Amino acid sequence: MVRIAAASFVGTAIEFYDFFVYGTAAALVLGPLFFPGFSPIAGTLAAFATYAVGFVARPLGAVVFGRLGDRRGRRPVLVVSLVLTGVATVLVGLLPTYERIGVAAPILLVVFRFCQGFGVGGEWGGAVLLAAEHAPPGRRALWAGIPQAGPSIGFLLANGLMLILSGSLTDAQFHAWGWRVPFLFAGVLATGGLLLRASVEETPAFRALVAGNETSASPVVEVLRGHWRLVLLAAGALACGYVGFYLTTTWSLQYADDRPTVGRTTMLACIMIAVSGMALVTPLFAVVGDRYGRKPMCLVGCAGMGLWAFPMLGLLATGEPMWMTLGCLGTLVAFMAMFSVVGAYLSELFEPRVRCTGASTAYNLGGVLGGALTPMVATELARGDSTPWGVAAYLAGAATVSATCLLLLPETNVVPVTDGEPAAA
């Protein structure tokens, strides 16, 4: 289990490193480099629009890779998705700007961002199911929660490198070439991840399906016909988590960068401290989820994000690093109370024959609903010099919607992950 969890965790960390490094670059530099004819605020919105393309691509990747995972196994998904995301990220780092190749630059930026999102859409399902379907009874949330810590580490790697470059280079150097370094480094990380995943075995649940000749001939159609309501409810339940996470880690960076008293380096440091705290509580929350259930933990996290929304915005508006860090930390800890158990929860909601397709689609559709438009909406709501309370209301509203969806979903803690279709589905 340690070797399997390590392979799941490392690959997820690498793929989300690729995904997050784009979000940070979009907040800091991509607007003026690829959309130079826009005003500063319009350029940022345009960069965030290309950022949103990655979220739109994630459910499509989930469907394609989910079918691969349900037809051919979870293991092939881990390899192909990692290669696709790594190559796309490196190509962003090599892409000439608008000044060099004109309109082809933003067009290619959108294409590469789409490929990033497509690969990440497949990664999560393969990685989490690899851990969940190998996990012993009573410890499924813990082992499936380990890949859920991967995005935290990926974020710390991406922003740590950005922080070093931002702090050590002049603005001219950072805009000229410094921002490219984290994208190019993705190639090194992807190579290491592939080597680690080469020896991973297929999961017992999928081997049992193959042995019994029970694999689905068309998992996508099967999910659409028999599990569409479950997919939509699960996606809606996860949406507020994405809103809270990307408000904290992406929009807040741009918000601080627009305020000369704070700046990007200070805000990056605040966010990284908060994300480190989030990573530390992940296994603790997963253990609690194994004991008390998935649904209660999700409801606690959802309520926490909604209740903390207004304090978070007030703390960000102070411009004081200690209070900004606390504001980010509160939201991210509440986020992880929910997402530490999501790997086990979605694995148990769907029967094994369509699990990769169903769980991946629900997870990534939630990303579209909650993450795709959040930086753009928040940027619009934050116009002006006053505290952007509208952003807090946006997060609180998303938490209310997600809590409603959660209440309509069943608890699954008693569902054996290798059994046939659970009653919940």
Image (tube, rainbow, N blue to C red):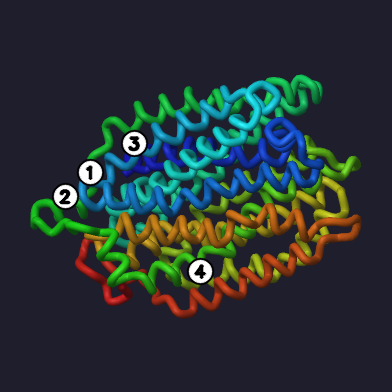
Is disc 4 surrounded by few (<14), some (14 to 19) or many (20+) residues within 10 Å? many
Q: Is residue 312 visible?
A: yes
Residue under label 3, please give it: 80
Closest to the observer, 263 or 298 = 263
Tell me how far mark 4 sits from mark 2, CA to CA: 31 Å
Query: In terms of sequence position, does the residue under pointer 2 or pointer 3 come before the other?
Result: 3
Helix, strand or loop at mark 1? loop
Residue under label 1, please give it: 202
Residue under label 2, please give it: 207
Q: Residue at x 35, y 41 (%)?
A: 2
The amino acid pointed to by label 4 is Ala
Q: Nearer the viewer, mark 1 or mark 4?
A: 4
The amino acid pointed to by label 1 is Glu
Identify the image quadrant of residue 258. top right
Do callouts 1 and 3 mark residues in contact (Cβ within 8 Å)?
Answer: no
Q: Eyeballing the image, is 339 above or below 34?
A: below
Q: Nearer the viewer, mark 4 or mark 2?
A: 4
Helix, strand or loop at mark 4? helix
Q: Nearer the viewer, mark 1 or mark 3?
A: 3
Is disc 2 surrounded by few (<14), some (14 to 19) or many (20+) residues within 10 Å? few
